[in-house]
Image (cartoon, grey):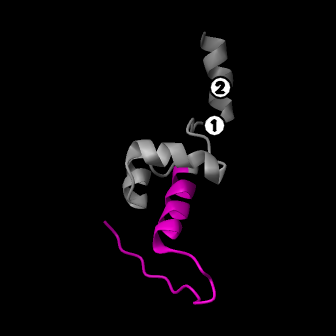
């Protein structure tokens, strides 16, 4: 696993766990991580991560809208 060190200004009052959640959520949203991988990155269980996705305006159903049209056509 890679390690990334970033410098966050002291004036930005944000916890490490919140930053990890932001990164994990965005990578999940982009399809770069699975739900389990993103949960691990955030230091959470899959269930807890999935429950918190909505508070970050990210759907647990992470697939492109174009796939929906294909699914309907194949139904």
In the figure, is residue 51 to the left or right of 47?
right
Instruction: Note whether 65 is above or below 70 in the view shown.
Output: below
Contact? badges 1 and 2 (CB < 8 Å): yes
Span colored in magenta: 1-28
Residue at image location 49% in from the left, 52% down from the top = 32
User: Residue 15 in magenta?
Assistant: yes
In the figure, is residue 40 to the left or right of 74?
left
Q: Residues within 10 Å of mark 2 (few under 14, many from 20)?
A: few
Q: Nearer the viewer, residue 14 or 4?
A: 14
* Rendered image: mark on residue 64: 1
Residue at image location 63% in from the left, 51% down from the top = 55
**Total numbered circles:** 2
* Rendered image: mark on residue 68: 2
The percent coordinates of residue 57 (x first, y second) are 67, 49
Residue at image location 34% in from the left, 70% down from the top = 2
- State the quadrant of the N terminus: bottom left
> In this view of the protein, can residue 55 be seen by the observer?
yes
The percent coordinates of residue 54 (x first, y second) are 62, 45
Furthest residue in direction left, as rendered: 1
What separation in Å lies between label 1 and label 2 (alpha carbons)? 7 Å
Residue at image location 52% in from the left, 50% down from the top = 28
Instruction: Note whether 32 is above or below 65 in the view shown.
Output: below
Q: Nearer the viewer, residue 1 or 45?
A: 45
In the figure, is residue 6 to the left or right of 72?
left
């Amino acid at each position: 696993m890679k390690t990334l060190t970033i410098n966050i200004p002291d004036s930005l009052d944000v916890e490490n766990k919140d930053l990890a959640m932001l990164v994990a959520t965005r990578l999940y949203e982009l399809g770069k991580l699975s739900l389990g991988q993103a949960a691990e990155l955030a230091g959470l269980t899959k269930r807890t991560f999935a429950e918190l996705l909505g508070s970050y305006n990210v759907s647990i159903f992470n697939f492109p809208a174009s796939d929906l049209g294909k699914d309907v056509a194949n139904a």
